[in-house]
Amino acid sequence: MQVSDFHLTYCTNIHPGESWEATFKNLKEYIPKIKGELSVEKAFAIGLRLSDEASRDLIKPEKLAEFKSWLSANDCYVFTFNGFPFGGFHRQVVKDEVHLPDWSTEARKAYTLRLFTILAEIMPTAMDAGISTSPLSYKYWHKSSEALDKLMEQSCVHIMEVVEYLYQLKLDKNLDLHLDIEPEPDGVIEESKGLIQFFKDWLVPKGVPILSKKFGLSAEEAEAAIKNHVQVCYDVCHFAVGYEDHEEVLNAFEKEGIKIGKFQLSAALKANIPTEINQRRAVEKALLPFVESTYLHQVIGRMEDSTLHAYPDLPDALMDLASTKELEWRIHFHVPLFLATYGDVHSTQEDIVSVLKLNGERKLTSHLEVETYTWEVLPEDIHLSLDQSIARELNWVKNNIK
């Protein structure tokens, strides 16, 4: 839905189901309820998550025609896809497998191209549209510099094939489409410096000759095309977990000509680590309900001198809680936006307020997507009905858009 100058939606990865049949069923069930909860009278935006399996079905002409008809009949539009999770994302162990297949593979490229083919058919022609994707791979799978370089080489080849496709769509149909890389803790690209380095050291040097040769572009035109078609999915939770200053990050991206494809509005958990052991037990008690087996919940601790220490998952951090000298933990757990505290721990809700304010001032992107996908694994006392939960999230964002 349009709020001021922005298009606000929620990511449908909240709904379990990997087939297009299950995905479409969820849309039919929940979209009318959420529109009703929000009293939306104008067009309603959908942030669509399609698995590889669902994309193979929806790309069929008859299924696409049916979906386009449903969107029109229900006054809905799609301007963004979540193309990060390729396969199962609910009610099974996901953990680091969310990165499979990674960008070194043909499967990831083919899946992404399929998503763009679908999006090009259903997107509003008067606006740009994007697909968020993984930060190339999971960093612990690439132990040596040689392995990492090989990943980077292969990833650039595959991403540039996507860029070529998007540039041709721009020439043929005047569609503005972009692939939005999503930095994430323990991803190969996990923070702003890593993303900037990827553009400067890999994607632009590798990609400019490819576009120049194929389309007859100058080096400057080719670089501009790459940065138009490869942008950033700025997940606020992920940058908050890394203790990044949002204004500094956005300034750095702007300096490098790196664009924001969308802001994913999500909140992390954070906990101050007391000096007294007895008080630490209270923090442990507050965090234990968030230990669950589906997703990775990376933890980054901050020392007094501001150095950071990363834990692969929340249970690993809790093992060190009694002895750590860290002052604060940030936990990668997409908790509800509308809650600021969870007993003895808090959320990074203020980071979202800060990002919304900066975006309101600078108009960096019109794409805003709520991504709270952990409802099924949250402690019981936080649960509402799913449609009420989503509506509450969207209303909170509406009230904080400046």
Image: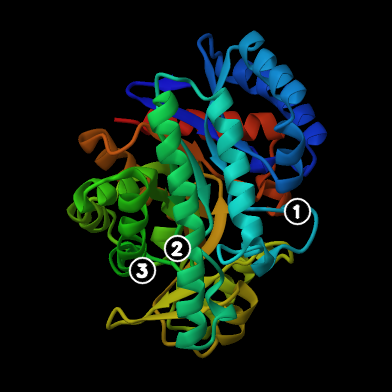
Callout 2 secondary element: helix
Q: Which amino acid does label 1 sit on?
A: Gly
Left or right of residue 55: residue 166: left
- Residue at numbered disc 2: 156
User: From the viewer's perspective, is residue 188 above or below residue 179?
Assistant: below
Q: Is residue 244 left or right of residue 346?
A: left
Is 55 in front, or is 217?
217
Query: Residue, x 29% and y 45% (percent of image)?
Result: 216
Is residue 372 at least partly visible in the picture? yes
In front: mark 2 or mark 3? 2
Q: How crowded is mark 1: few (under 14 residues within 10 Å), some or many (20 or more)?
A: some
The quarter of the picture where residue 108 lies is bottom right
Residue 367's x, y, as percent? Answer: 41, 34
Distance, label 2 to label 1, CA atoms, is 26 Å
For label 2, count other residues whose C-alpha is less than 10 Å away and answer few (under 14), some (14-19) or many (20+): many
Q: Is residue 184 shown to the viewer in this render?
A: no
> Residue 194 shows which numbered tag?
3
User: How far, Cα to Cα, is label 2 from label 3?
Assistant: 15 Å
Q: Residue 88 carries which label?
A: 1
- Compared to residue 329, the image places residue 396 above or below, namely above
Residue in the picture at 45% in, 40% down? 166
Q: Quick one: SS at disc 3?
A: helix
- Locate the C terminus by quadrant: top left
